[in-house]
Amino acid sequence: MEIGIIIHSLTGNTLSVAERLQERLSADGHDVEIEQLKTIGEENTNESNSANITLKSYPDPQAHDLLIIAGPVRGASASPVLKHYFSRIGQFEKKPTLLFVTEFFPFPWMGGKNALKQMTALCEEHGAEVIGSGVINWKNPRRERQITDLLQQFSESAARMDKK
């Protein structure tokens, strides 16, 4: 199965989890490609208006059998770069999609859950079928366990999709 991981990563935390996911899913026998959403020019880390963002490329959500979309939590919300990406792409055509966010704070209720709720709504507005999600809390002492659990959950979801 072809899996696309579309991410926005500011500090490298989201990218590091995506790379571990790529390694795990490749070991499971899937073709996995990470596509980073990179802005043209400097990204203002305080920018909340996605209208002022331009990306170097807009990955095609239809190019893969399964999508994983991820980004950092910004101000208890989904990344403005991800919001911009959704504003410029077409429909996902019932594409199975997994979501995760990374956040500095130690608990999901400190912004991660809200960001996932927003990302889920964006996916559903574009016709995607969200089949799983997770929050990685960078300052949580159980962060490594959260990552391991996410890898396992996403691996199992990909295996179920592969059997369909």
Image (spheres, helix red, strand yellow):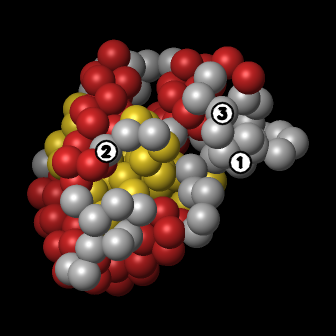
Q: In the rendering, which numbered label is found on residue 38?
A: 1
Residue picked out by circle 2: 111
Residue 97: % across, % down: 30, 42
Q: Residue furthest right?
A: 41
Q: Earlier in the sequence, mark 2 or mark 1?
A: 1
Residue 153: % across, % down: 16, 65
Q: Please, what secondary structure does the residue beneath circle 1 have?
A: loop
**Residue 40 vs residue 61: left or right?**
right
Comparing 14 with 131, the one in front is: 14
Residue 16: % across, % down: 50, 74
Q: Badge 3 local density, few (<14 within 10 Å), some, or many (20+)?
A: some
Residue picked out by circle 3: 47
Q: Residue at x 67, y 18 (%)?
A: 51
Name which residue type carries label 3. Glu
Comparing 137 with 84, the one in front is: 137
Based on the displayed image, in which of its 4 quarters is residue 125 positioned? Answer: top left
Q: Residue at x 22, y 59 (%)?
A: 107
Q: Are marks 3 and 1 in contact (CB under 8 Å)?
A: no
Q: Earlier in the sequence, mark 3 or mark 2?
A: 3
Residue 140: % across, % down: 27, 73
Residue 98, above or below 53: below
Q: Residue at x 28, y 65 (%)?
A: 106
Q: Badge 2 local density, few (<14 within 10 Å), some, or many (20+)?
A: many
Residue 50, above or below 74: above
